[in-house]
Image (tube, grey):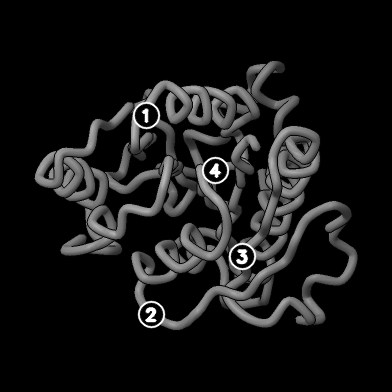
Amino acid sequence: MSRMRRLLLFARRPRLGKVKTRLCPPLEPEQALALYRGFLIDQLNLLRRCAADYRVEVWWDGPPDEPSLRGLNLARIAQREQPDGDLGQRLAYAFGERDMPAVAIGADSPTLGRGAIDRAFAALSELRPVVLMPAIDGGYVLLGLWRLHTEVFQEIPWGGANVAEATLKQAARHGLRVKVLPHGYDVDDDAGLRRLEADLSHPEIAARAPATLRALRLLF
């Protein structure tokens, strides 16, 4: 029997004053919320496009019956609630909760695209226990595991600028081969917002994130 492949989206619920706070200023909280909702719509669309090939799940930062989720298209997407703990503990729980392999992404990289997902799973199928896409800011935007290796979530300075580096060191320390994909980025600050704006000027990238593009056009 073939192993189920799981695609996990880690996301915050779109609530005013709770998302993209590092973008305020220059944005107002209402603008930050509208932008994040665009991110979320595009990433949920990505999950649905992948649903024929992967089991797709969204892991919310709280109960999925939150009123702020009304109006989002969650068809064919399993909804789960993240447990308590730091990011590493929450990721480890989600990865280990069902079959492997699995790839986790976040809601803050709306231009990521299907190609990156497929490359990550291809790397895992080539007997790479770990696949990682570093973020320009030092974190990572994608992590894939062939099976649960809790070591890659331990002794990591979550929220700092060395998350990807520390993860790679942990993998090496425990003898885990890693496929490192080309860098991506999260939209967490003004520099990320400007990078996103530049990327969306390219039609092939804009096609991946139409809701984000619409939200961005209302800002500038």
Q: Can residue 218 be seen in this view?
A: no
4 or 3: tag closer to the N-terminus: 3
Label annotation for residue 109 = 4
The x and y percentages for residue 28 are 60, 67
Tag 1: amino acid = His
The answer, for residue 100, to whether it is visible in the render is yes
Element marked by disc 3? strand
| Mark 2 and mark 1: Cα distance apart in space | 27 Å
Q: Which label number is shown at residue 59?
A: 3
Characterize the local packing of mark 2: few (<14), some (14-19) or many (20 or more) Cα atoms within 10 angstroms. few
Q: Residue at x 51, y 23 (%)?
A: 122
Identified by mark 2, the residue type is: Gly
Compare marks 1 and 4 and give the one earlier in the sequence: 4
Label pair 4/3, CB-CB below 8 angstroms: no
Q: Which of marks 1 and 3 is in front?
A: 3
SS under mark 4: loop
Quote the CA–CA distance across marks 4 and 2: 23 Å
List the residue tagged with mark 1. Answer: 183
